[in-house]
Image: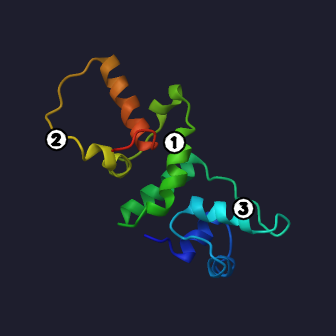
Amino acid sequence: MPLTQIQLAAALGLSQAAISQSVAKGMPTHSIEAARAWRETHLHPGRAKPAPRAPSLSALLEEAEALLDVGGDIGPLMPDLRLALRQVSGYQRAAVGMSEALWDVLTDPVGSAFELETPESLTTAEAEGMGAFWFSVAAGEVIAP
């Protein structure tokens, strides 16, 4: 599903008019990454605005949580959110906190492949391993076939 010009403008740090001009010239709208790549390839380097700095993980988590609280769509945030999660070092991942609703959205593509079962007691090591696995899923490092 194509992103709106407003979503692309926010993600790329550009005005909606600049996005509209680029779309008219052939910029793809199906993903932020594709739009960035097209701009890098097709715009003269002196005229292209540098890519905005990626938002911090905490800012992305706050925005995603706020959107979920009001029933909003976090789809446009997903690429940046997953990238920020991938950049968290292994030993710091257990400290990243987010709501169950956000975990569900981030892990749904893989989680929906499993049947719901009654949780069993896990050892601390097993729980840590399970947590590391699901963090990798949320970060987009593990994907469903």
Read off the residue under disc 3. 40
Q: Nearer the viewer, residue 114 or 93?
A: 114
- The percent position of residue 126, horizontal first and vertical second, equals 31, 20
Query: 10 Å neighbourhood of mark 1: few (<14), some, or many (≥20)?
Result: many
The amino acid beneath tag 3 is Glu
Kind of element beneath mark 3? helix
Compare marks 3 and 1 and give the one earlier in the sequence: 3
Q: Label 1, on which residue?
A: 85
Q: Nearer the viewer, residue 101 or 16?
A: 16
Secondary structure under the numbered disc 2 in the rendered image: loop
Colour treatment of the image:
rainbow
Q: Quadrant of residue 44?
A: bottom right
Residue at position x 42%, y 69% in the image: 1
Q: Find disc 2 in the rendering and name its residue.
A: 116
Q: Quadrant of the C terminus?
A: top left
Residue 72 percent coordinates (x, y): 39, 67
Disc 3 to disc 1: CB gap under 8 Å? no
Q: Nearer the viewer, residue 116 or 63?
A: 116
Percent x, y of residue 134: 36, 36
**Residue appearing at x 52%, y 25% in the figure:** 91
- Residue 19 lies, with reference to residue 132, above or below; the image says below
Where residue 35 appears, as percent x and y from the top left, is: 61, 65
State the separation of the CA atoms marked 1 and 2.
25 Å
Q: Earlier in the sequence, mark 1 or mark 2?
A: 1
Q: Is residue 100 visible?
A: no
